[in-house]
Image (tube, rainbow, N blue to C red):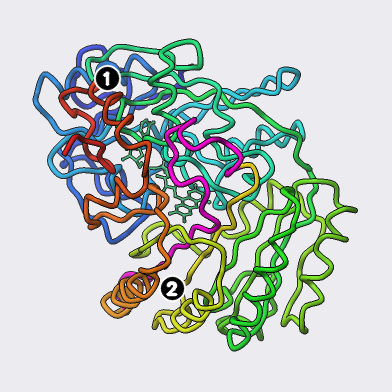
Amino acid sequence: MTTPTTAPAVETIDGFRGRLIKGDHADYDIARAVWNGAIDRRPRLIARCIGVADVVAAVRFARDHDLEIAIRGGGHNVAGTAVCDDGIVIDLSAMRAVRVDHAGRRAWVQGGALWGDVDRETQAHGLATTGGIVSHTGVAGLTLGGGVGWLMRKHGLTVDNLLAADIVTADGERLRASEDEHPDLFWALRGGGGNFGVVTSFEFRLNTVGPTVLAGPILWDAADAGEVLRFYRDFIRDAPDDLGTVVRFGAAPPVSDIPEDLHWRPVVMIGTCYAGPCRDAEQVLRPLRAFRTPLLDIVGPTRYVEFQSALDSTVVHGWNYYWKSTHLPELRDDLIDVIAEHAFSCSSPRSYVAMFHLKGAVSRVTEGATAFGNRQASHAITLDAVWRPGEDFGDRDTAWSKGFFAALGRFRQGVYVNFLNHDEDPDRVREAYGSVYDRLVDVKTTYDPGNVFHHNQNIRRD
Ligand SMILES: Cc1cc2nc3c(=O)[nH]c(=O)nc-3n(C[C@H](O)[C@H](O)[C@H](O)COP(=O)(O)OP(=O)(O)OC[C@H]3O[C@@H](n4cnc5c(N)ncnc54)[C@H](O)[C@@H]3O)c2cc1C
């Protein structure tokens, strides 16, 4: 698959047909920017590839010139690992093609695609695979780390739907990894991140979803957070796998679906998405919707593809972000007390907390069957400080995120690697993988013994 471009190359790498963007290029500052505006790195060269041959050429060029490599898929990772200082960015953002085999229920997706690209093409056939909850997130980084989203409790993590991947390895070789081809590499790609090479294409299994689903948020006042969480804990214990929920704590964002008088009011918001028939969803959700009197309930029949972009405007490219994250067990009363105490004490109206309900199909896959660790955890929580350029909330809310994380210390149960930040203790990568870490080190040693791909949440022998 090749995405055509008319832009001329500005410097020659043997065999490279895409765009090479250096520091003196007019597009350099745009091309080096990533989603997190707090990341400000200056690579020597950005190699915007338009096909697999470009990726091979760029990897070989980097090796020959001893350049550090960063791989850019969607450029969305909070740690900013898609861009490095002084090295080369192998940029796949021009490789976003998606092809759907409707009858075979499969999709082939290039390594620079965003989830919005995938949902749009697959939903045209009433199909979907588990993706993230923000449509401008990259497919590659999200998939390689595991992939959590609204559909995971029914259809598994994104990696549980991955059938194969095409990859360019550290020595510039092209491999296909699947259950039958390089199965050790295929195992490692399902959670092990960008440690093994540049993935140029993914093949996913697709499932029937919607295209209309019952979905939407229910809002309660922040003062009720403790009681809402206690009710939520009991409600999700028996909820069917069709139901995906994410709890968001923070000021109600000024989006068009929320009435203006609620904008910026501190609320606990339970986002829901039911992956089965709408008539079943009405019945399943009734008790939650009837709990106390919500400030707002906008659950209703919604096109899944539109619901997938409902949060996009609340996490804008170029704002500054600092996250801490951990997995959590079931919501015991003392854990709920800690969450309720800290969730609303940030300063910026844009800072928020998001808590994904895991379990269901995620925890039915045997631990170690893929490289995604800690499958038995109940929730993944992220404590997200957000401030716009020029605003002075950064120091205070970074301290809030760290303080909240420390308060959760005794409940921690691993972490999702894709929610780790740039300044984490290296032990946290091991924490993310738990019992699968040592096997990941073995596969890393086989496919990238020189640790060429290290600008990431790095897997290495200590
Ligand atoms: C607002 C927001 C919402 C999010 N929501 C979710 C969510 O709902 N579910 C979820 O699971 N995660 C979510 N995430 C986390 C997300 O999974 C990671 O940020 C992920 O890294 C994004 O992928 P990307 O391709 O944009 O990453 P990039 O920033 O482009 O890359 C990050 C790293 O991924 C690796 N990588 C990227 N592309 C390739 C490639 N083609 N080949 C090999 N390695 C590659 C590299 O190691 C790179 O350093 C969210 C993140 C944000 C910022």
Q: How many marks?
A: 2
Q: Residue at x 32, y 23 (%)?
A: 18
Q: Residue at x 29, y 80 (%)?
A: 396
Q: Nearer the viewer, mark 1 or mark 2?
A: 1
Front residue of 412/279: it is: 412
Provide the residue span drawn in magenta.
Answer: 362-391
Q: Residue at x 41, y 29 (%)?
A: 189
Would you identify the image quadrant in which residue 444 lies?
A: top left
Which secondary structure type mostly characterizes the magenta part of the structure? loop
Label 1: element kind: helix
Mark 1 residue type:
Tyr
Q: Ligand 1, what quadrant?
A: top left
Q: Is residue 74 left or right of residue 161?
A: left
Q: Tell which circle, 1 or 2, labels the residue nearer the N-terminal end.
A: 2
Would you identify the image quadrant in which residue 331 lies?
A: bottom right
In percent of width and height, residue 399 lies at 29, 76
In percent of width and height, residue 295 lies at 72, 82
Mark 2 residue type:
Ser
Q: Which residue is mark 1?
A: 447
Q: Which residue is mark 2?
A: 351
Label 2: element kind: loop
Magenta stretch: residue 53 in it?
Answer: no
Front residue of 163/85: it is: 163
In percent of width and height, residue 2 lies at 46, 18
Quadrant assignment for the C terminus: top left
For this orientation, the residue located farthest to the bottom is: 223
In percent of width and height, residue 188 lies at 39, 28
Front residue of 339/420: it is: 339
Q: Is residue 271 left or right of residue 97?
A: right
State whether residue 323 is above or below residue 349.
above
Q: Is residue 338 left or right of residue 194?
A: right
Q: Residue at x 25, y 40 (%)?
A: 458
